[in-house]
Image (spheres, rainbow, N blue to C red):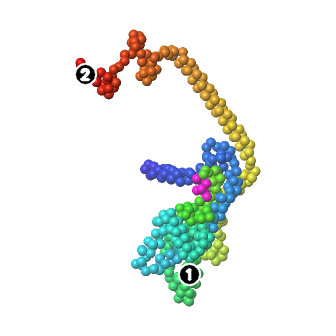
Amino acid sequence: MNLSFLRVSIWVYLAIFFLYLLGPLVIMSVTAFNSSAFPRMTPWECLTFQWFGELFQDQRILNGIKNSLIIGAGTVVLSVAMGLAGALMLTQIWPKLRATYYTIIIAPILIPGVVLGISTLVFWDRINRMLGLGADSVLSNGIFLTVIGQSTFIASYCMLVLVARLQRYDVALTEAALDLGATHAQAFRKILLPFMRPAIASAAVLAFLASFENYNTTTFTFGEYPTLTIELAQKVRYGITPSISALAFIIVALTVFFALLNEAKLKRQELVAAARKNATVEELAGKIKLPSFFAGNVAAMLVVIFAAATITVVGTATAYSPDQCIANVKEQKQLEADQRIQELRKQREERRKQREADEAEQGETQSAPKPSNNSGFGNVFAPNALSGDEDESNAEPQPSTNGGFGGAFDPNSLKTDE
């Protein structure tokens, strides 16, 4: 009971994990076939392949892909060479210095890509000025700076892959070659290099993929040669279209295809090795019957199915026309928009009638205002504010004998008593 529950839990966990990991890629790939102008999976409108056509007509994307391929090739050559040199040096350096040397070689992986990009740009700009070169020199070229900037940390990844392979190398093979009269270059080219070839291929693939998807370092060094990631970032900033989803679908499809092809190749090698190991003496003396390419090779079958599905989709895309479906969708959207406009107009008319009814009801219930004698300003300017009673208004004003100034100039104040 507990064992079965544990197995179910593991399968559920794996399902959730891969759904979380691959779900966004699947959804984005599906949006490449929806006729909606914005990449979305729902609501589904029409099956279309027009976004693939727009992708191959986008000159900025095509130019970015070209620059990414050129920079990736340069990064592979430089990173694999530096990684191989670093791995060989690690195996030959004094044992007490290996830890320090290893730390120095791995350090670029821990440095943020932004710092590497800025430092690469500043350093080579100073070198360019010291040499008295212009702004159009090779040292200021965006491809050169990007290759140098990316190789500073990608070479460390390559070195890790090569060191893992080099640890299984038997040094006695090289020593035997040297004892038999071979030079160091010949021993390296004919013995060590063939042994390191699988690791070199793996390091090259890793370096290319790391260069192709890099953004942090490239954003400071690309100059006039923007890569695909730079172009995609600029497009996302101003709004994306399903053509980006078409590009994502192509990248995912190519990745899956080459992964299945590599798995089929490895499985084929395992089957051949097993057949030779289990062969009898008579078969070894004669001709060994090797298994076919598809015998027990599930990956090879998947490759064939994948290729057949791709050919079918491409053939369908050339013959299928979604114009009628798109026209029907546009007509349906127009009808929905007209219906929505009619509903808004109806709601506006109902609100207007309700407002008029409320105003009419308020006019009936509200009585007319009574005239007021209050003219404002505290009734200062009222008509009767300056007049008292009728007797006082008709009475003549009495002359005043007070001349002001405390009566000092009053004529009577100068008279003395008789």
- The residue sitting at 42% across, 18% down in the picture is 386
- Callout 1: SS: helix
- Of tags 2 and 1, the one toward the viewer is 2
Is residue 53 part of the magenta span, yes or no? no
- Give coordinates of residue 248: x percent, y percent: 62, 55
Magenta residues (range): 231-237
In the image, taking residue 1 as reference, residue 155 lies left or right, namely right
List the residue tagged with mark 1: 188
Q: Is residue 63 visible?
A: yes
- The residue sitting at 55% across, 21% down in the picture is 358
Which disc is residue 416 wearing?
A: 2
Label 1: how many Cα within 10 Å (few below 14, some 14–19, many 20+): some
- Is residue 123 positioned above or below 304 on the image? below
- Give coordinates of residue 325: x percent, y percent: 72, 42
In the image, taking residue 383 as reference, residue 145 lies left or right, namely right
Q: Which is more toward the observer, 414 or 150? A: 414
